Amino acid sequence: MIVRSLDEVKTVDWGNGISRRFLLESDGMGYSVTDTVVRAGTSSNLQYQRHLEACYCISGSGWVVATDGTRHPITPGTLYALDQHDAHELAAADEDLRLVCVFTPALRGDEVHDLTADGFSRY
């Protein structure tokens, strides 16, 4: 059994927020669970080439935009899943957006985004 509290997990600053990584590849579960905060007023172009990701909003508000321009509001109680390694824009409105995210396969734990690159940050 694995039991961890927020003050025990690895925290990574991924550029426009932080990712608190509760489960990692080394835990052998086959997936990762993160508590991710997107900083208020930020927007990030992201894509996961190696992982599928599902995110469930627990606080704040923002939106996720598909490459075809479709904008989906994100508020508490909303889940979105990137089931096709989807490139997307993730943005927080005027308050931090907090998401519980599941990645498969699991994250190693040291991954970070390069938000200065042209196009979408990938890992």
Image: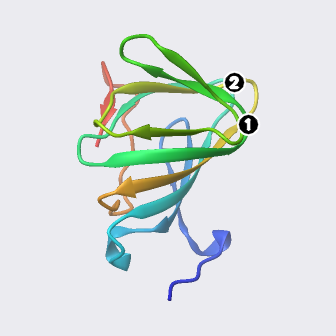
- Mark 2 surroundings within 10 Å by alpha-carbon count, few (fewer than 14), some (14 through 19), many (20 or more): some
Q: Indicate left or right for 100 with 117 as reference.
A: right
Q: Name the residue: 33% across, 27% down.
A: 87
Q: Indicate which disc residue 60 carries.
A: 1
Outermost left residue: 50
- Residue 83 occupies quadrant: top left
Provide the secondary structure element on which disc 1 rests.
loop
Q: Is residue 112 above or below residue 82?
A: below
The residue at which mark 2 appears reads as 93
Q: Is residue 41 above or below residue 121?
A: above
Q: Indicate left or right for 61 with 30 as reference.
A: right
Q: Label 1 sits on what residue type?
A: Gly
Numbered label tally: 2
Whether tag 2 and tag 1 are in contact, CB under 8 A, the answer is yes
Outermost top residue: 69
Provide the secondary structure element on which disc 2 rests.
loop
- Mark 1 surroundings within 10 Å by alpha-carbon count, few (fewer than 14), some (14 through 19), many (20 or more): many
Q: Name the residue: 60% across, 75% down.
A: 8
Q: Name the residue: 39% across, 54% down.
A: 103
- Give coordinates of residue 98: x percent, y percent: 66, 44
Q: Is residue 104 above or below residue 24?
A: above
Outermost bottom residue: 1
Q: Which image quarter holds the C terminus? A: top left
Q: Label 2 sits on what residue type?
A: Ala
